[in-house]
Each structure stands twice: as structure tokens, then as C-alpha cells.
Amino acid sequence: MNPVLPPFLQESFDRGVDPLDDEATRVWLQQHPEHLQAFAALRATLREVADLPPQMRWPRRWRPLWFLAGAAALLVAAWLAASSPAVTVLPRPLFAPRAAVLSITTTERIADGTRAFAFATVQGTLSHKASTTFSTCSTGRQLPTVFLRTTVREETVRP
Amino acid sequence: MSQPLTSTDASAAVPVDDATSFGRQLVALAGPMHAFLHTLCRGGAVTGASVDDLVQEVMARAWRSRTTFAADRGTLDAWLSRITFRVYLDHRRTPAASPTLAEEPATCAPGPLAQAAAREQLQWLLGRLSSRERGVLLRFHRDGRSVAELAAADAVPTGTIKSLLHRARARLWAAFLRGEQP
């Protein structure tokens, strides 16, 4: 079925007249009864458009292009996620069982961009700890901003 | 009934079994023809008859001229649609024959439910047009502005406005041909 609206029907609508006022159109429609239903629906629709209120909301058109773009973006994201290297799991330190720990030494050093640093040591057993701290002043010379924190934990365990 | 008959006394020429079968097929198409007439009336009212009256007339005419139907020249649906269309044309309110006070008013106005359904379908159809096509279509058919006025308002050639209008109508036409529904 030809979906093209015949030009003479377009012209009738352009002139703002009922196409059925034209004898040639009436004859054509009777010769093409397969178009009668579509013609009646179009004529009725255009007539009813006149009764529409000025303020009316229209549903958004479904745009296949947008849908395809979204699907493509999802595919790319999935491909990137699949092709990136697996997250490396850091090895867990082999801490001794809690009952085997005789003493602990934790040393923490903090340095910043002023070259000053702080040094703290915690030493003792699980039930008794002693801490020592040591810090320096800034030299006044600014270095590139680097903040460094180092923590070293040492355990003495039963043999 | 592949051979069209020319006799005016159709009841004598058509075998009873065929006539009964034909009658059943006509009755089965009464509903679609009612809907078709209703759509035609939405586009332009009729005078002095209701849609039900017109359906009766369609069925009577179809029965009287049943010998002219030839299955090899088209479907019964198309044949009956043509008769329905002629009946509508005979009753259509034309500008030349405006209704008078003595005439019975047209009674094919849809009920509230049908109106709501028609409005919903109209909104759905217009929503499928691009915003430019819809805007031009509404300003032309709803606001009654001419092509020249629209062209001047949008500062575009009249050909652009016509093109948008024609494209919008062609989209609606194609949707109707395909029988698309919301």
C-alpha cells in the first residue's frame, strides 16, 4: 500500500477546504476503496485538531538514534570493564597468632613538604605499651608538597 | 458468486445458500462499517440521520446490489466500504445545503468515552510528529493561520511551511494506513 498522501489531497487541505467538496477527489476515493479508511481518519483528525486547547503537553518521541547511542555507550562501558586488568589484591601480612606475640614495636614516621617530620614508636606487649615520640621543626624551605606516612609494625613472637 | 449478475431481481438469481452466506458476511462487517461511518462523521457531520440509520441504509443497499459484488475484483470489505462512502456522501452536510431549523440535527456526535478515546489517539498521533511539524500543523489547522502567515512569522519561505505541513499529514496518513494504535 502506497503510504504517500496524494498531492491533490494535500492541496485541498492547504486551501482549508474539505477534500470531499471536490468531485475528482470523491471519484478517486471510490476508485481506491483501500484508502477510504485512512482518508476518513486523516480528515477527522485534522478536523479535531481545531478543537485542541492551546496549551497541551506532548509525549516525547521515541528516538531510535538515542536508544542506539545509549546501547552503544553501555556496550563500550562493558567492554572497557572487561578488558581492564584485574584489581591486584595486596598480600595479607603473615601476622602471628595473637597468643604467640611477645612484644610489638610500631614505628610511624610522618613527613610533609616543610621537611619537618614526626617520629613515634610504640613498644611493649599486648597488655603493656610504651610510646616514644620525636619530631623536628621546619627548615623554612618549602619543598614540593609531599606528605609521607610510613608505619612499620614489628612483632616478636614465640619460636 | 464470481460472476457478477446484471439482473435487478437479485433474490431470484442468487441461490439461497449463497445469499445466506453473503448475508452473514454483511452482518459481520456491520461493526467495521459503523466505525468507518463514525470516523467519516467526525470529519464532517451528516444531516437528518444517525450513524445507526446510515448503517441500516448501507446494509440495505449492499443487499440490494449484492449481485454486483465480484470476489475476483476485490474484497467484500472494499466493496462495502465503497457503498458506505456513497451513503455518507448522500447524507453529508455540504456548504451548499446548510441545515435548516426543520431538519433533524445530526446525531453522530460521539459520547464522552468515545471523545476521550479520540482525544487520546489524537494526542498520541501528534506526539509522534517532530516538534516543528506539529507546531506548523497546529498553527495551520487549529489556529487557522495561512501558509503565508506562518512563513512570515517564522521568517522562512512558504515552501518550507508547506513541506512541513505535507510531511506531518503524510506521517499521519502512513500511520492510518498501517492501522497504528496507541
Image (cartoon, coloured by chain):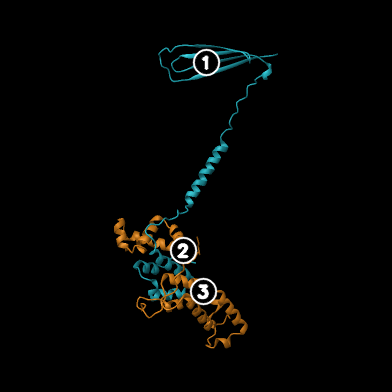
Chain colours: A cyan, B orange
Give the Cα separation between the discs numbered 2 and 1: 77 Å
One can see residue A2 in this view: no
Percent across and percent down for residue B134 are: 39, 58
| Quadrant where the image shows the N terminus of chain B | bottom right
The chain letter under disc 2 is B
Asked whether A100 or B1 is in front, the reply is A100
Do dots 2 and 1 share one subunit? Answer: no
In screen coordinates, is B158 left or right of B53?
left
The amino acid pointed to by label 2 is Ala
**Is label 3 or label 2 in front?**
2
Q: Tell me the mark number nearer the camera, choosing from 1 and 3.
A: 1
Residue lying furthest right: A159
Chain for disc number 3: B
- Secondary structure state at the residue bearing disc 3: helix
> What's the CA distance linking mark 1 and mark 3?
94 Å
Three-letter amino acid code at the position of disc 1: Arg
**3 or 2: tag closer to the N-terminus:** 3
- Residue drawn at x 55%, y 79% is B70
Respond whether the residues carrying marks 1 and 3 are from the same subunit: no
Identify the residue under disc 3.
Answer: B78
Q: Which residue is mark 1?
A: A109
| CA neighbours of label 3 inside 10 A, class few (<14), some (14 to 19), many (20+) | some
